[in-house]
């Protein structure tokens, strides 16, 4: 029995069974049926048109997640939103965000790119989920210097180094503190040729991987760094700081001009962050909702990786 494609039903069924049920390649089927490989491809396509082959997609994700992602993309003009499961355990939320970020990076990185990373406990989760056997011709760099006395695993240098090793890629480290108290001393420090060369790399970042912090939630980390006092934290609160990206503070509208603390940071600037072609913001749990919203309002990120409960709250704003 022939059809509009000119192939017999028997041939289409035979070909489809070999391909879909016996998992033979088109080249193997070509040998068995003594038909060219290009013909096998056309026969399989014809089998779909005739309804002999029907492909269904079993979506293991919650449909609600897909809808929320699309709604957030439209609302905030984002390239992509990725939602992960929420939990009452903050460590589990960070674990989920880290895994999703690792999966996204494996999908999007391309040879020749420079990938900048910030700091924090959530970003320190990302390298744990990278499984890679091939050489990646990319370079990972930190987007700010080290942060004093806090645990080394959350430093941007350490995260850049671990990601580079997991991706079998290159890296460059910024041998500098993240903050210098005196602005005059900072200006002298950054005139160093090596620091100047590193600053040029900030302008060439293709992908930025950034944790979204809340200075009022991250008080212990800021205090442990030795760069901030409790009075500094109170001043930041009084001035309206609700979020920080790469230790750069912003208010609820995403503005950072009012914060003198930002001038002390050795690292990328807020304006340079906005110019990164693919900037990824990682935020959660729900307590960081206002910080994430400020980051979105300031247009600092183009991709958001967030947990479910926080995503619902962002959509209600």
Image (cartoon, rainbow, N blue to C red):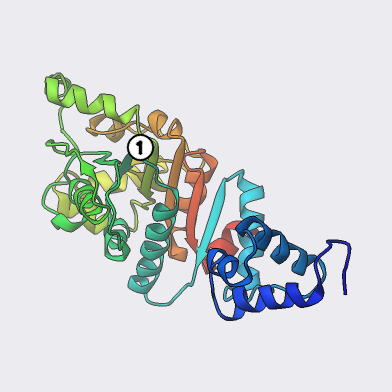
Q: Quadrant of residue 153?
A: bottom left
**Is residue 133 something that shows in the picture?**
yes
Question: What element does badge 1 sit on?
Answer: loop
Specify whether 151 is left or right of 159: left
Instruction: Between residue 49 and residue 288, name the one nearer to us.
Output: 49
Instruction: Between residue 228 and residue 43, name the one nearer to us.
Output: 43
Q: Residue at x 83, y 61 (%)?
A: 5
- Which quadrant is the C terminus positioned in? bottom right
- Residue holding disc 1: 113
Specify whether 198 is left or right of 313: left
Instruction: Between residue 235 and residue 14, name the one nearer to us.
Output: 14
Q: Position of residue 214 (x, y in %)?
A: 37, 53
Q: Residue at x 56, y 67 (%)?
A: 31
Q: Quadrant of residue 173?
A: top left
Label 1 Cα crowd, 10 Å radius (few <14 / some 14-19 / many 20+) = some
Position of 100 relative to 56 (above/below): above
Q: Residue at x 87, y 70 (%)?
A: 2
Residue furthest front as drawn: 34
- Which quadrant is the N terminus positioned in? bottom right
Instruction: Between residue 32 and residue 281, name the one nearer to us.
Output: 32
Q: Position of residue 78 (x, y in %)?
A: 58, 45
Q: Position of residue 192 (x, y in %)?
A: 11, 21
Position of 196 relative to 302 (above/below): above
Q: Position of residue 166 (x, y in %)?
A: 24, 56
């Amino acid at each position: 029995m022939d059809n509009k494609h000119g192939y017999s039903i028997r041939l289409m069924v035979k070909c489809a069974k070999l391909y879909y049920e016996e998992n033979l390649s088109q080249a193997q089927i070509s040998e068995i049926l003594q038909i060219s490989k290009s013909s096998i491809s056309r026969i399989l396509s014809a089998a779909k048109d005739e309804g002999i082959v029907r492909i269904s997609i079993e979506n293991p994700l919650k449909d609600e997640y897909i809808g929320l992602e699309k709604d957030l993309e439209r609302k905030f003009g984002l390239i992509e939103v990725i939602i992960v499961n929420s939990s009452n355990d903050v460590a589990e939320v960070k674990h989920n965000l880290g895994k999703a970020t690792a999966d996204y990076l494996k999908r999007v990185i391309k040879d020749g790119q420079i990938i900048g990373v910030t700091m924090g406990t959530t970003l320190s989760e990302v390298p744990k989920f990278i499984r890679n056997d091939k050489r990646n011709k990319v370079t990972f760099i930190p987007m700010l210097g080290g942060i004093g006395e806090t645990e080394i695993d959350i430093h941007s240098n350490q995260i850049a180094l671990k990601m580079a090793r997991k991706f079998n890629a290159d890296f460059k480290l910024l041998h500098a503190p993240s903050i210098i108290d005196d602005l005059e001393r900072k200006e002298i420090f950054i005139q160093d040729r090596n620091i100047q060369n590193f600053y040029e790399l900030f302008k060439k970042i293709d992908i930025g991987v950034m944790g979204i912090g809340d200075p009022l939630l991250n008080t212990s980390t800021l205090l442990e760094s030795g760069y901030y006092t409790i009075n500094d934290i109170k001043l930041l609160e009084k001035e309206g700081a609700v979020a920080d990206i790469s230790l750069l503070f912003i208010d609820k509208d995403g503005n950072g001009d009012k914060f003198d603390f930002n001038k002390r940071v050795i690292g990328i600037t807020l304006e340079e962050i906005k110019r990164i072609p693919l900037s990824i913001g990682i935020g959660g749990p729900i307590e960081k909702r206002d910080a994430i919203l400020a980051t979105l309002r300031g247009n600092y990120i183009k991709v958001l990786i967030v947990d479910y409960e926080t995503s619902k709250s962002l959509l209600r704003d």
